[in-house]
Image (tube, rainbow, N blue to C red):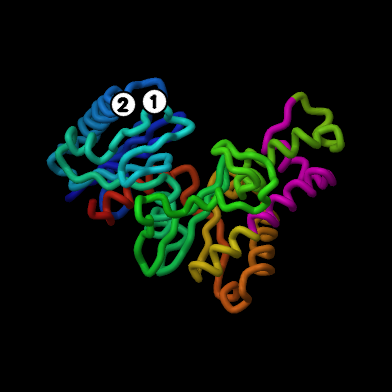
Amino acid sequence: MAYFLAIDVGGTKIAIGVGDESGAFRGIRTLATHPSWAKEAAIANIYEAALELLSEVHVDLTECRRVGLGTPGPLDGTRLLESSNLVAWKGLDWRAELEAKFHIPVAVANDATAAGLAEWQFGAARGTRDAIYVTVSTGIGAGIIAGGALYGGARGNAGEFGHIIMQPEGPLCHAGHRGCLESLASGTAIRRMGQERQEQSEYLKVLATVDTKDVFDGYIRGDEVCVDIVHGAADRLGLGLSYLVDLFNPEKIVLGGGVATHAPASYRQRVAAAMARWALPSLASIVTVVPAELGEDSGIKGALALAITQTP
């Protein structure tokens, strides 16, 4: 049997898995991300952890065909550009460095792109030829499947959906864009709006601190301010999705990420209704908006799907 190595790089942890073509894992291990590591140390620690995992699951490195890696972006091909979470790793060429260690091909993609591939290969978008995965969490991003293939764009950064400008004079996001979708509809945006309006909310004003979950808790309880915040964020996300519908004509839009996964169904229904209201009717009529199926496993499953399907 052939095996594949999957590596999902995050701002707080790195997950490494050994899996097969069915999408099943023989084993997964995680290590804490230390953004202060030098680039060489990051590669060395990932390599050592992968070798230890292979030994634990009794798979030899020679049995592994390929490595798949999902990473925060932006990317220049397979080289990491400046990332707000991994500043010290700027310029790290994932493919070159990992191929020098493992001596097998390495496929690299933006983490949202990889998660979209996972949902298409193993999850909610199975059986489609044109689908878009949208992650709504701390930020907002997208993974695009077009014509039955992953679409990464010229340098691997297609799907930076969160940075389309919705309100040119709106709030700033962490990347310095004013009024982008991420600054108006992400988990971070919902938390910020909850904090700004805390004293207006019967539910929030008694809390010592306000987080995204608190705003959704207030929404579920019918608090007027929380309902207004969540409805506004859902409507703006739906408007953003309408652009994707008109541009890519997908069959499915899969909503994932911490916010979209854990929010009540009424939030996703509101998003879908807003999308249908603003997209071209003939295109919106064929789209179904569905929740992601893979949950917390989407990152590592995406890295495995990269390893299985992509030729570096």
Residue appearing at x 41%, y 62% in the figure: 145
Instruction: Name the residue beneath numbered marker 1.
Output: 88
The picture quadrant where one finds residue 206 is top right
Question: How many numbered marks appear?
Answer: 2
Q: Position of residue 48 (x, y in %)?
A: 24, 26
First in sequence: mark 1 vs mark 2? 2
The picture quadrant where one finds residue 190 is top right
Q: Position of residue 220 (x, y in %)?
A: 76, 46
Q: For residue 39, which numbered disc appears in the image?
A: 2
Q: Is residue 183 left or right of residue 131?
A: right
In this view, the residue in front, 308 or 232, is 232
| Classed neighbour count for the residue bearing mark 2: other residues with Cα under 10 Å, few (<14), some (14–19), many (≥20) | some
What are the residue bounds of the magenta stretch?
A: 209-238
Q: Is residue 158 left or right of residue 172?
A: left
- In reply to whether residue 98 is colored magenta, the answer given is no
Mark 2 residue type? Lys
Q: For residue 136, which numbered disc appears in the image?
A: none
Mark 1 residue element: helix
Dominant SS of magenta comes to helix
Residue appearing at x 24%, y 30% in the figure: 47
Q: Report, in whole angstroms, how far the alpha carbon at label 1 lies from the one at label 2.
A: 7 Å
Q: Are marks 1 and 2 in contact (CB under 8 Å)?
A: yes
Mark 1 residue type? Ala
The picture quadrant where one finds residue 137 is top right
Establish if 61 lies above or below 12: below
- In reply to whether residue 226 is colored magenta, the answer given is yes
Mark 2 residue element: helix
Q: Position of residue 294 (x, y in %)?
A: 46, 50
Q: Position of residue 154 (x, y in %)?
A: 35, 55
In this view, the residue in front, 81 or 8, is 81
Establish if 20 lies above or below 138: below
